[in-house]
């Protein structure tokens, strides 16, 4: 069974892409798509998966040899244009609590065959707590 995603502070919809991913994997198994179509992870994504990827408790659906790893990228104003890759759940929570809104993407990666697919997307941050105004 797959681990629960690390999506604690999302607001709005959490968009899941597992149905799309399962359809693509099925197309590979049935010969309608090439393995290379799904197994094209960029070097930097593989490096992130090895460095900060969380093991998902699920074998790769393509090669069945490696355990999938989840990598999260966070994008938002005043963050790196290439996104920030939180190194821990606490780091992700800190980013999700920013005053400025962020968009988070969780990607599953196989470091063996380079399978990769977007798992889910969610929005967070941008919700500044309103303190009650003190009358003067
Ligand atoms: Zn694989």
Image (spheres, grey):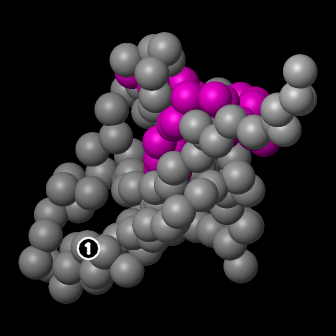
Residue 6 percent across, percent down from the top left:
70, 55
In this view, the residue in front, 37 or 121, is 121
Residue 28 percent across, percent down from the top left:
22, 74
Tell whether position 48 is magenta. no
Outermost residue toward the left? 32
- Location of residue 96 by image quarter: top right
Tell whether position 101 is magenta. yes
Q: Residue at x 58, y 37 (%)?
A: 126
- Location of residue 11 by image quarter: bottom right
- Which segment did they paint magenta? 82-108
In this view, the residue in front, 10 or 38, is 10
Q: Is residue 21 visible?
A: yes
Is 59 situated above or below 132? below
Q: Is residue 48 visible?
A: no
Q: Residue at x 58, y 67 (%)?
A: 59
Left or right relative to 99: residue 40: left
Q: Which residue is mark 1?
A: 24
Outermost residue toward the front? 136
Instruction: Report the quarter where the N terminus lies.
Output: bottom right
**Residue count near mark 1 (Cα–Cα under 10 Å), binned few <14, some 14–19, many ≥20:** some
Q: Residue at x 82, y 32 (%)?
A: 133
Instruction: Report the quarter where the C terminus lies.
Output: top right
Is 104 situated above or below 27? above
Residue 71 percent across, percent down from the top left:
56, 42
């Amino acid at each position: 069974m797959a681990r629960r995603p690390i999506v604690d502070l999302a607001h709005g919809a959490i968009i899941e892409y597992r149905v799309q991913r399962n359809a693509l994997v099925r197309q590979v198994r049935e010969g309608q798509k090439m393995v290379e179509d799904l197994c094209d992870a960029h070097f930097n994504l593989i490096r992130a998966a090895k460095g900060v990827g969380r093991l998902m408790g699920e074998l790769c659906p393509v090669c069945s040899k490696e355990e999938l790893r989840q990598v999260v990228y966070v994008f938002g104003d005043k963050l790196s244009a290439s996104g920030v890759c939180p190194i821990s759940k606490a780091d992700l929570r800190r980013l999700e609590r920013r005053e400025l809104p962020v968009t988070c993407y969780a990607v599953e990666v196989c470091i063996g065959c380079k399978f990769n697919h977007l798992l889910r997307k969610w929005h967070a941050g941008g919700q500044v707590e309103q303190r009650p105004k003190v009358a003067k």
